[in-house]
Image (tube, rainbow, N blue to C red):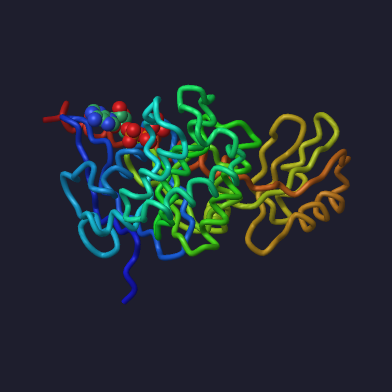
Amino acid sequence: MSVHPLEMRSVTKRFGFFTAVRDLSLTVPQGSIVGFLGPNGAGKSTSLRMSLGVLSPDEGQVRLFGGAPDIDTLKRVGFLPEERGLYKKMSPRAIISYFARLKGMSASDSRKRADELLEVMGLGNFGRSRISKLSKGMAQKVQILSALAHRPDFLILDEPFSGLDPVNQQGLEDMIIEEHKRGATILFSTHVMEHAERLCDSIVMMARGRKVFDGTLDQAFGALGRAALIGVEDGYDLNAAISPKGFTENELAGDHWRVSLPAQYDAQDALRAAIEAGAPITSFRPEEARLRDVFVSLVSEAEAEDLEKTLATRKATEAA
Ligand SMILES: Nc1ncnc2c1ncn2[C@@H]1O[C@H](COP(=O)(O)OP(=O)(O)OP(=O)(O)O)[C@@H](O)[C@H]1O
């Protein structure tokens, strides 16, 4: 049986009476890039801290490379925490090589590696400057490089893209791809769906401490359902026209209709049905599913469920 870099089983974490993470189970398989998504306060950072043993779960189990996180398994991990902060008086070169040495690299290898990474990230000229002289984005790049300098088997990055401009975000995406090619497994949290869409094999979505989705990108898009967007002249009822042809889930959304596609049909079939019905069509395009839409639909479902549970509990309490 292969040992996964990370497995969490029914993990719950409370802070006082507040449950930050509730019954979370997830697996990060060897060689995968997993996106950990969720709005502010969803419980992502708390979960990542538990994965490293920085926080202990109140219930459930965390397995890092098959065991409880310890000094040896942690050497195989590179972690970018959500809190940014570096020793202001040290140079990027000294910091990166310091972290690499902490994780077991030799002094000379770690300095060589720091120079190489700084060059790749466009910081070659700043290697010996003080951190206090760098911009916020530059300092963040140094922190990211510190997490991966020792060539970890498993990289855990908490909101790595926040605080970087679009050019540097692209640079970081490229770097994540390079790390993955090198053989690293990667888990990163973000609330920017586009990065996850471009990088991930699979995603785990959280909302209010609960997992609301765990699967591949295709499965995530499948959860949303496919649709065709058809514009018609003002006042025309496309729903009435194409419902008898098997397209029964249609909504007017601004200047077009969103026609949900039953499993056996594609967008062209919906267009054909509209033409056959004599609809005065002004525009047509298959809907491009975006992860953001999946996320909004799942999160609002989760919020609706939470609300229902709260109401049910309140009713039960009132009845008692
Ligand atoms: N040490 C703590 N003590 C009390 N509450 C905490 C603590 N750490 C986190 N929380 C609470 O737990 C919830 C989840 O926080 P967490 O930082 O895990 O969310 P997140 O998904 O990472 O959000 P963000 O993207 O805003 O960082 C939040 O409501 C937060 O206020």
Residue 74 position, x and y percent, is: 28, 54
> How many discs mark residues in the rendered view?
0
> Which of these two is toward me, 11 or 315?
11
Taking the image as drawn, is residue 306 in sight?
A: no
Going by the picture, which residue comes out furthest to the bottom? 1
Residue 59 position, x and y percent, is: 17, 48
Residue name at image x 43 percent, y 55 percent: 109
Residue name at image x 76 percent, y 36 percent: 256
Residue name at image x 54 percent, y 47 percent: 196
Residue 158, image quadrant: top left
Q: Splitting the image into four quadrants, where does ligand 1 fall?
A: top left
Give the position of the N terminus as an image quadrant.
Answer: bottom left
> Which of these two is toward me, 37 or 135?
135
Taking the image as drawn, is residue 30 in sight?
A: yes
> Which of these two is toward me, 75 or 204?
75
User: In the figure, 133 relative to 64: above or below?
Assistant: above
Going by the picture, which residue comes out furthest to the left? 320
> Which of these two is toward me, 261 or 285?
285
Give the position of the C terminus as an image quadrant.
Answer: top left
Going by the picture, which residue comes out furthest to the front? 108
Judged left or right of residue 282, residue 20 is: left
Residue 88 position, x and y percent, is: 40, 25
Residue 174 position, x and y percent, is: 61, 50
Residue 250, image quadrant: top right
Residue 246, image quadrant: bottom right
Judged left or right of residue 103, residue 256 is: right
Judged left or right of residue 100, residue 247 is: right
Residue name at image x 44 percent, y 50 percent: 149
